């Protein structure tokens, strides 16, 4: 019997502050929505914004961390998520209903801080001292909390470069 692949990686901005609650067993649950930016031709030689909005749920330590660090407009990367569908019957109409969302297992900051967030991006001071996250277009010297502390290879090692059109990028 074969198994299906259910893996999600996303990058986008929170559209609202996370809603945090605690289950009866003490597990934290965080829910929020993300806007994933995209653009489409507008038919007049230009492009128009065409965002996709995705609901996200986190549990446990990821949810606790989201409560402390994430705010509306935070730019994050969701790693190792999965798609989940809830199904139920509407009590008033009796119609079958469903909702698809992403269950996120890990997340990372992916850019500069939104207005109103702490200068260090919400990280405790000791973690900020271990290394810093790169600004857009910069390669980091090392990532804090990631084993090895190695540096990223130049962009040319990935088959891209300064003259590579966005359409040719694999991500």
Image (spheres, helix red, strand yellow):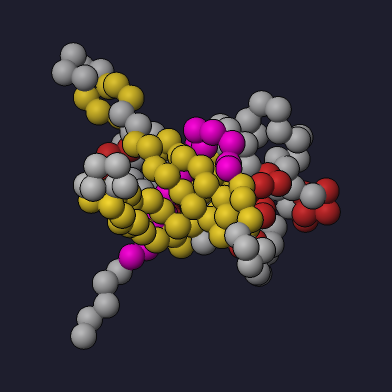
Residue 162 higher or lower than 47, as above or below: below
Q: In this image, 14 relative to 164: left or right?
A: right
Q: Residue at x 42, y 44 (%)?
A: 55
Residue 135 higher or lower than 106, as above or below: above
Residue 37 higher or lower than 141, as above or below: above
Q: In this image, 117 relative to 28: left or right?
A: right
Residue 51 within the magenta-colored segment of the rendering: no
Q: Residue furthest toward the top?
A: 44
Q: Residue furthest toward the left?
A: 43
Please provide percent x and percent y for residue 134. Answer: 62, 43
Residue 45 higher or lower than 64, as above or below: above
Tell me the magenta residue range.
Answer: 6-19
Front residue of 60/70: it is 60
Q: Residue at x 29, y 42 (%)?
A: 92
Please provide percent x and percent y for residue 139. Answer: 58, 47
Q: Residue at x 66, y 47 (%)?
A: 67
Please provide percent x and percent y for residue 13. Answer: 50, 36
Count of numbered badges drawn on the protein: 0
Q: Residue furthest toward the front?
A: 92
Q: Residue furthest toward the bottom?
A: 1
Front residue of 105/119: it is 105
Front residue of 67/142: it is 67
Q: In this image, 168 relative to 105: left or right?
A: left
Q: Residue at x 27, y 39 (%)?
A: 167
Please provide percent x and percent y for residue 68. Answer: 71, 46
Tell me if I can see residue 70 in this picture: yes
């Amino acid at each position: 019997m074969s198994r299906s692949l259910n893996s999600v990686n996303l990058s986008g901005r929170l559209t609202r502050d996370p809603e945090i609650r605690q289950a009866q067993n003490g597990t934290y649950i965080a829910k929020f929505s993300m806007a994933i930016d995209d653009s489409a031709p507008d038919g007049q030689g230009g492009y128009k914004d065409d965002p996709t909005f995705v609901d996200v749920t986190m549990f446990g330590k990821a949810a606790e961390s989201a409560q402390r660090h994430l705010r509306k407009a935070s730019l994050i990367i969701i790693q190792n998520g999965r798609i989940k569908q809830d199904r139920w019957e509407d009590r008033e109409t009796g119609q079958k209903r469903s909702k698809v969302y992403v269950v996120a297992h890990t997340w990372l900051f992916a850019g500069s801080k939104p207005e109103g967030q702490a200068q260090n991006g919400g990280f405790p001071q000791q973690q900020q001292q271990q290394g810093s996250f790169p600004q857009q277009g910069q390669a980091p010297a090392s990532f804090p909390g990631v084993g090895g502390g190695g540096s990223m290879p130049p962009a040319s090692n990935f088959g891209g470069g300064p003259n590579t059109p966005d359409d040719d990028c694999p991500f």
